[in-house]
């Protein structure tokens, strides 16, 4: 039960409720999701099972793509369409050119302040709990990367935009900042996550499809292998002796061909070049994914960062 399911979260469901559903259906205790979607948002929600939960941190780092509907002229407390209205202003004077200019100002490396209604913790308590109690606190702005921001439809007062962004980006905050830049306020009216890393909405399972897969016993065929989220790292294949070294968590030096079995480097370059690589994937001779190695430049060694259990070692 080690792997990842690509689930299309429906509107009105929390991310945690999808995790709870998969736990109940699979009987697997170790289940987690890679990146919370708000209850009203839909789209790609990778669900990790078993040893797959150990690569969630790499999915958090992955680039994500969204389609967002932003309503101009109405600002709300949680920055979405389901909260208390805090500001209203007629947006009818906003032109497409003004809108595109404001979007351009939000592109690239930006500073973003998380909304009060978020899971970020303040002195051990999630901000949304404080917000519901009527308590507001100062939030520190954080750097985030907006790789692309494209206006795909403009039906005043609603703009539909496609966003590709880095980790930690709040699309609700992006909508709020757009409203501020235009001087009329704005809120997030609708949101679909189109992609999370390699997981695409076109391949995502609806909840009924997921339930059918468990009911009829073919759900494991729909799981992605753990290493799917790590394919951007170079892969190496090691012999049994080196595999045992990795399994024991011991550091090692990798040079082309020095570990017996050829230590094949099946991709375009070798991770034995520390200047170009910080991590690599390692596999046993029979193709089992063994773990992730990270390079220690001070010692010139590769340290097992995460090791996954493989039978026979």
Image: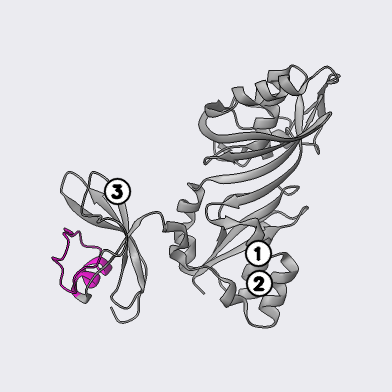
- The answer to if 45 sits in the magenta stretch is no
From this view, report whether residue 293 is shown above or below residue 287: above
What residue is drawn where x is 52% and y is 29%? Answer: 108
Lower position in the chain sequence, tag 1 or tag 3? 1
Front position in the image: 135 or 289:
289
From this view, report whether residue 145 is shown above or below residue 181: below
Secondary element at image label 3: loop
> CB of mark 2 within 8 Å of CB of mark 1?
yes
Residue picked out by circle 2: 24
Work out how far the residue at label 2 is from the one at label 1, CA to CA, in angstroms: 6 Å
In the figure, is residue 232 to the left or right of 296? right
Front position in the image: 287 or 74:
287
In the figure, is residue 125 to the left or right of 297? right
Residue picked out by circle 3: 278
From this view, report whether residue 303 is shown above or below residue 84: below
Q: Which residues are magenta?
A: 241-264
What residue is drawn where x is 62% and y is 76%? Answer: 219
Residue picked out by circle 1: 20
Q: Nearer the viewer, mark 2 or mark 3?
A: 3
Residue 47: assigned label: none
Lower position in the chain sequence, tag 2 or tag 3? 2
- Residue 275 pos. (x, y %): 23, 43
């Amino acid at each position: 039960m080690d792997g990842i399911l690509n689930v299309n979260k429906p509107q009105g469901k929390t991310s945690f409720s999808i995790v709870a559903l998969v736990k109940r259906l699979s009987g697997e205790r170790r289940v987690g999701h890679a990146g919370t979607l708000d209850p009203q948002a839909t789209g790609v929600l990778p669900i990790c099972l078993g040893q797959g939960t150990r690569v969630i941190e790499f999915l958090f780092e992955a680039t994500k793509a969204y389609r967002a509907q932003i309503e101009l002229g109405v600002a709300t407390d949680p920055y979405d369409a389901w909260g208390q209205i805090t500001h209203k202003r007629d947006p009818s004077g906003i032109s497409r050119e003004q809108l595109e200019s404001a979007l351009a100002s939000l592109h690239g490396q930006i500073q973003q302040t998380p909304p009060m209604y978020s899971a970020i913790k303040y002195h051990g308590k999630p901000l949304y709990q404080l917000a519901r109690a009527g308590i507001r606190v100062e939030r520190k702005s954080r750097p985030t990367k907006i790789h692309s921001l494209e206006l795909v439809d403009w039906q005043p007062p609603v703009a539909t935009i496609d966003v590709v962004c880095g980790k930690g980006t709040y699309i609700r905050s992006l909508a709020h900042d757009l409203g501020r830049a235009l001087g009329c306020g704005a809120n997030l009216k609708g949101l679909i996550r189109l992609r999370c890393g390699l997981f695409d909405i076109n391949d995502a399972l609806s909840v009924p499809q997921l339930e059918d897969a468990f009911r009829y016993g073919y759900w494991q065929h729909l799981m992605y292998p753990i290493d799917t989220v790590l394919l951007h790292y170079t892969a190496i294949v090691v012999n049994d002796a080196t595999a045992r070294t990795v399994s024991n968590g011991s550091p090692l030096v990798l040079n082309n061909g020095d570990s017996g079995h050829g230590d094949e480097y099946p991709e375009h370059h070798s991770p034995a070049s520390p200047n170009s690589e910080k991590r690599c994937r390692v596999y046993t001779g029979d193709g089992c994914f063994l773990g992730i190695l990270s390079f220690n430049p001070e010692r010139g060694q590769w340290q097992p960062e995460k090791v996954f259990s493989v039978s026979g070692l």
